[in-house]
Amino acid sequence: MRSWKRVAALFAVMAMVTACAGTTDTTTTAGEEATTTAAEETPETTAPSETTAPEGEGDPIVMATSLPLTGGFSIPAIKHQDGYQLCVDLVNEKGGVLGRQLVLEVEDNQSVPETAVTQYERFVDEADVLLGTFSSLITGPTSAIAEQNGMVYPVPSGGAQRIWERGFQNMFYFQQGPAEGIGRASTNALTYYMEQGVMDALPATAAVVWADDPFASGIANGLLGGEVTDPDGNVVADLAPGYLAEVGIEPVMEEAWAEGFTDWLTFANSIAQSGAEAIFASTASVDEAVALVQGLQTVGHQPSYMYMSQGAQSEFAELLGGGENHIAIHTAWHSSLEIEGALGGEAYSNADFVADFEAVHGRPPDEDEAIPFSVCQGMVQAIDGAGSTDNAAIAEWMRSRTADDPVVTVLGEFYWDEKGLPIDRDYNLTQWQDGTLNFVFPIGEFPGTTDLVYPKAEW
């Protein structure tokens, strides 16, 4: 697809990109005072953040990330910044790590992979450790910069399986697994609830629609049973027959939309004309998810089940004003999960995270804040475990994690395979129910599960 051709082109030229190209604004934070440097050339890219002054023994540890704070990925990216910042602030309150305070450096890549590449090339010279960005589209080329320079690259958002087929040694994924496996959360949940009698039968037909984006197309690929290729075009995985075929749901529409697409009414009409009972929509942004739902509302198509890859954010429900009701969304995290992690050398639970986030922001967190918080947790544990900010030592410590000695975060426990993908984890499924995003699958693993509502209520 075009988006992957764009990423492939970036891989080809990134070695020639100089660290001085495309200077952008930087916001650096730690503790209680602000230190902000802004290049005169592009003041519009400043990453806003409340900041604090470092205290403690030794020089601060600089953690750097490039995030799409503006552009198409801005809603989840701003939340990623908030998650990183809360973690840094709490660790500093607990005395830092290795007797040193943390400093968070954030730059806005404007949702442009080329800009992010330039920023990470600068970070490898300026920062002690890197933090990952948002979106597979941007994670692909930026992770290559980290690998080329021997730096650990912890990934909060970069699930396209192709990214993990390059033989990299320094990437570690802080979600459940590749995008290609996400569709299994829906089909497993539907099968379970049919067996429990909540629904009489599975939907017979489905429309599978997706954005021309590595992550979104990866989800569709798993549902439809396609192939996964590495950056050289070699087939590394055959996903046939696909999750829908495995449970007997027939795809009657398979279609992607291009980057910058706006004709949502026509697209929604195509879905309606297909007669699909279920819709599996994999979007690259919250804006796309909202626009597609609004188009379906306008044409009056009433699916019995609707899954979307974006929409766990509170903004999704606010913008749709009830139109989100009974839409299902996979998630890596939920506030009801009873998980005990660690932060700053002390026990730190998921409930602690929720309470601390609410105290700072006056609202509950969602997964786009919890995931980067988890990444920061993991890196703090790795620095402490390695006893150093040396990236080779940090990578070795992370690769040595096991089921008996994992990284422990608000997302749960992590240890990784040789590709950097987490072992023994699976995606959860949530559903909007009357204004609340409820946890609906799997059953029995966590408290607070509510039954899936099926069929979906009419708009």
Image (tube, helix red, strand yellow):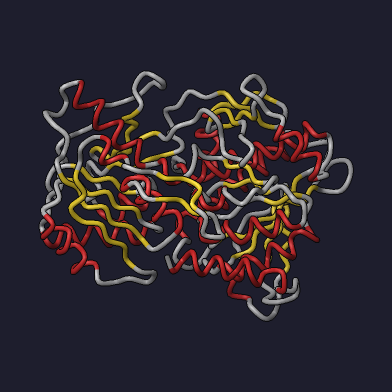
Residue occupying the far bottom of the picture: 41
Write the residue at 54% across / 62% down: 68
- Could you tell me residue 309's position as x and y percent? 36, 49
Total marks placed: 0
Q: Quadrant of the N terminus?
A: bottom left
**Nearer the observer, 1 or 340:** 1
User: Is residue 48 rendered to the left or right of residue 217?
Assistant: right
Residue occupying the far right of the picture: 58
Write the residue at 42% across / 35% down: 427
**Nearer the observer, 210 or 134:** 210
Write the residue at 43% across / 61% down: 213
- Could you tell me residue 10's position as x and y percent? 60, 69
> Residue 417, relative to residue 142: is it above or below?
above
- Could you tell me residue 123's position as x and y percent? 74, 60
> Residue 204, relative to residue 221: is it above or below?
above
* Residue 40 in sight from this viewpoint: yes
Write the residue at 71% across / 38% down: 380
* Residue 53 in sight from this viewpoint: no
